[in-house]
Image (spheres, rainbow, N blue to C red):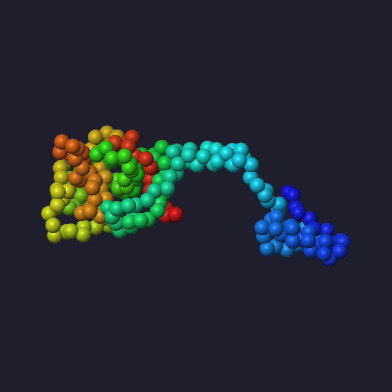
Amino acid sequence: MNYARVSPLGSATKWHAEYSACRQRLSIKGDLDSGGFCRYPRVVESLNPWRLLVLAAVAAGIVLPLRAFVVEPIFIPTASMEPTLPVGIHLFCDKITLRRRDPARGDIVVFRPPTGEERGVVKRVIGLPGETVELRQKSVFIDGKPLEEPYAVHKRSEEKLEGDDLGPVQIPPDSYFVLGDNRDESADSSVWKDAEGRRLLFVPRASLAGLVRGIY
């Protein structure tokens, strides 16, 4: 490591000039150590443009693969997962775990919806491949048995809404039935339709980008 040295010898005037130059070069309000050295390493006064390009390329070579294959920051723009995930919260999409295992019931996942939207959405996995799912008056039944859902809320419980009743329907292989925790304010498997009005009930396994992880 290079250091800027100010000699303790010589006239007071020369010493002061050298010391001031050292501080000016380093752009710090520092001090000298016991050996007469500035405490901080020398900084480059002007960066070479080619070096900047190389550094930018290296950074891109690290960040882009990380976002594509490992982890990506995400933002919650809607209230469909409240109160679990409030609007405006920043999280991570873990893209590794679902390469090692299948999604489990209760997982919160990031995916592209079957409606064809480009932006990813966040919902909770409710039904698994091969299961029969049914909605009865806002309650979920899996293979005929009620599903306990302490995370689910119904802010319009007195209203009759489109997604309150559905099925029973069997979930195809490699597909999942997903719902938002804020049931009455969520566009999800209970209400999705294509341009011709046909139901889009399931999310293909291939559309899942990853699991939602902690706040950043």
Quadrant (top left/top right/bottom left/bottom right) for the C terminus: bottom left
Q: Is residue 162 visible?
A: yes
User: Quarter-wise, where is residue 117 in the image?
Assistant: top left
Farthest residue, direction right: 10
How many dots with numbers?
Answer: 0
Above or below, 49 against 3 in this view is above
Q: Is residue 39 visible?
A: no
Residue 103 in the image: state x and y as whole percent.
34, 42
- In the picture, measured across the screen, residue 186 lies left or right of residue 13, that is left
Farthest residue, direction left: 160
User: Quarter-wise, where is residue 17 in the image?
Assistant: bottom right
Residue 201 in the image: state x and y as whole percent.
21, 40
- Residue that appears at 30% across and 47% down: 123
4 or 139, nearer to the observer: 4
Residue 194 in the image: state x and y as whole percent.
19, 37
156 or 18, nearer to the observer: 18
User: Quarter-wise, where is residue 150 in the image?
Assistant: bottom left
- Residue that appears at 48% across and 39% down: 64
Residue 3 in the image: state x and y as whole percent.
75, 53
- In the picture, measured across the screen, residue 82 lies left or right of residue 198, that is right
Above or below, 131 against 14 in this view is above
56 or 180, nearer to the observer: 56
- Residue that appears at 42% across and 55% down: 215
51 or 11, nearer to the observer: 11
- Residue that appears at 79% across and 63% down: 16
- In the picture, measured across the screen, residue 79 lies left or right of residue 159, that is right
